[in-house]
Image (cartoon, grey):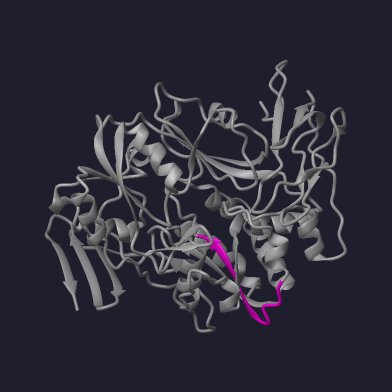
């Protein structure tokens, strides 16, 4: 059954007027108007992006927050096309925004002369459990690549680099195959730690330039654009398609199991509850429903509509009861804001006793920014402050490295550590974030004789005379060569040189 029609029951789409950074858009339709998929509903008066109907139907209500559309029983696959004189005007007309969650209008971001600089494509899919970016690459690699190419043309970039975690071997090899006709688009492999998808982290990892928290990527002659945003750019230019669809990951405490499920091209205005039902429904009692990822998402209700910036819907197990424990909160630029952390304190049944900001966090116009995302100088001073304030527990939302430094001091002071992702990761059987067990650097792709990137050679598996298999793996670290050899039925041999 489609997302738009469910038998005789009326289907309502609440399409928010603010699906982007900036001010809410202004409705250009009236109650009673008939609309189609792609009908323009609202336009920005300042910074913002056009908003469109995601269904065929009738406008039933217009509020300060949304245009409410009752979907027709029968839905068409067609849509109202946009028009524009060039690539940039089509991207603007389509109302495309940053689909990684930030929601900055893409036409504004690409309206720059990079003078031969870089388009950096954020395919890190940084948050745990989210999988829709990788599914997009597997299912639509060519169109995604063409979207990157259009972004390069618009911004006068000479090169593009797709930043993707090294662990995604299948997606990487597929991209390498499809990039044969695009010599100016290459890959940069990222470690599997959080927050490698943060904008300045992408610039640092790919270009080797650490920008200050107040700087934009343009200061490094670059624009960072999400991989799904690139796909929507291609749709706008090639198909004249407005932006009213979103790829979504749904996971957590579901009747079909805790494995993440991906839904492609979901109409905006679809409710969280509808998507959860499509994923099998909630399995018994739950703690909360998160819209977004474990780090940056927020608790929502079943009636919350998705937008062009939504990415994940996660259902968690119930919270443990801390029975009034005195809680210290360590606010981090990489995790939840103060409202989110206060909400979690209440759900844990803890008493908020002290608040500290991460040592790396800098206030930039009312928003915390990390001085060097993913690299932490230590948090012992903050932990000592919690201890002196009488806290018995602390709640953190830090990145992988900062969490690791917290664990270097908090247990020694007999403080119980809770990470804001704990209840999410426990729901799906993943280890909680505590110690950094993965390298912060990874080997980059090898090059062939022509200087083009090629897949890694397959790991060596040797057949011995007795028919037993040996496994051998080597990798280059910052301080030498790490080699591991496993002989079947024998000891594990680990060597550093």
**Can the viewer see residue 10 in this picture?**
yes
The mark total stands at: 0
Q: Is residue 429 magenta?
A: no
**Residue drawn at point x = 81 percent, y = 62 percent:** 89
Decide if residue 310 is on the left or right side of residue 157. Answer: left
For residue 160, which quarter of the picture?
bottom right
Q: Is residue 284 above or below residue 475?
A: above
Q: Is residue 114 magenta?
A: yes
Residue 298 placement (x, y as % from top left) = 48, 41
The one nearer the camera, 301 or 65, is: 65
Looking at the picture, does residue 470 appear above or below residue 59? Answer: below
- The residue drawn where x is 29% and y is 35% is 350
- Name the residue located 36 percent from the left edge and 32 percent from the top edge: 347
The quarter of the rendered structure image containing the C terminus is bottom left
For the point 65% across and 46% down, which residue is it?
308
Closer to the camera in the image, 306 or 482:
306
Magenta segment boundaries in residue numbering: 112-123
Q: Residue furthest top?
A: 8
Residue 280: percent from left, percent from top: 51, 26
Rendered location of residue 175, percent (x, y): 56, 63
Q: Is residue 31 above or below residue 7?
A: below
Q: Is residue 248 left or right of residue 6?
A: left
Q: Is residue 329 left or right of residue 163?
A: left
Q: Quadrant of the N terminus?
A: top right
- The answer to whether any part of residue 431 appears in the image is no
Residue 355 place in picture, x, y as percent: 33, 49
């Amino acid at each position: 059954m489609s997302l738009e029609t469910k038998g005789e029951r009326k289907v309502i789409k609440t399409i928010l007027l603010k699906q982007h950074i900036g001010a809410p858009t202004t409705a250009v339709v009236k109650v009673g108007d008939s609309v189609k998929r792609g009908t323009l509903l609202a336009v920005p008066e300042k910074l913002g992006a056009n908003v469109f109907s995601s269904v065929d139907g009738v406008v039933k209500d217009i509020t300060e927050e949304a245009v409410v559309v009752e979907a027709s029983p029968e839905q068409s696959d067609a849509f109202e096309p946009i028009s524009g004189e060039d690539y940039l005007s089509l991207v603007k007309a389509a109302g495309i925004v940053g689909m990684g969650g930030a929601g900055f209008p893409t036409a504004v971001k690409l309206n720059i002369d990079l003078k031969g600089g870089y388009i950096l494509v954020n395919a890190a899919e940084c948050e745990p459990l989210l999988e829709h970016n990788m599914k997009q690459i597997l299912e639509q690699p060519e169109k995604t690549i063409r979207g990157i190419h259009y972004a390069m043309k618009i911004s006068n970039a000479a090169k593009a680099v797709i930043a993707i975690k090294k662990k995604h071997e299948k997606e990487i090899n597929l991209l390498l195959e499809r990039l044969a006709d695009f010599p100016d688009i290459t890959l940069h492999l990222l470690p599997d730690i959080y927050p490698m998808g943060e904008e300045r982290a992408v610039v640092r990892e790919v270009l080797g330039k650490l920008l200050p928290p107040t700087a934009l990527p343009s200061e490094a002659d670059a624009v960072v654009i999400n991989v799904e945003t690139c796909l929507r750019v291609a749709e706008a230019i090639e198909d004249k398609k407005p932006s009213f669809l979103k790829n979504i990951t749904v996971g957590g405490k579901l009747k079909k199991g805790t494995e993440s499920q991906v839904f492609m091209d979901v109409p905006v205005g679809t409710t969280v509850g509808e998507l959860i039902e499509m994923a099998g429904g909630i399995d018994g009692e739950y703690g909360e429903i998160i819209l977004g990822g474990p780090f940056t998402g927020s608790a929502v209700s079943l009636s919350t509509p998705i937008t062009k910036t939504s990415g994940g819907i996660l259902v968690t197990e119930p919270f443990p009861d801390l029975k009034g424990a005195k809680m210290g909160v360590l606010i981090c630029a990489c995790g939840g804001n103060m409202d989110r952390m206060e909400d979690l304190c209440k759900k844990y049944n803890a008493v908020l006793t002290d608040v500290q900001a991460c040592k790396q966090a800098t206030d930039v116009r009312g928003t915390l920014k990390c001085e060097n995302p993913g690299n932490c100088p230590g948090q012992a001073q903050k932990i000592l402050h919690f201890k002196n304030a009488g806290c018995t527990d602390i709640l953190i939302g830090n990145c992988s490295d900062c969490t690791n430094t917290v664990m270097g001091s908090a247990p020694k002071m007999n403080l119980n550590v809770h990470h804001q992702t704990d209840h999410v990761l426990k729901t799906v059987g993943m280890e909680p974030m505590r110690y950094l067990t993965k390298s912060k650097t990874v080997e980059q792709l090898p090059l062939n004789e022509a200087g083009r990137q090629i897949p890694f050679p397959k790991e060596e598996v040797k057949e011995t005379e007795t028919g037993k298999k040996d496994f051998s793996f080597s990798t280059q670290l910052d301080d030498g060569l790490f080699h591991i050899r496993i002989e079947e039925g024998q000891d594990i041999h680990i060597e550093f040189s």
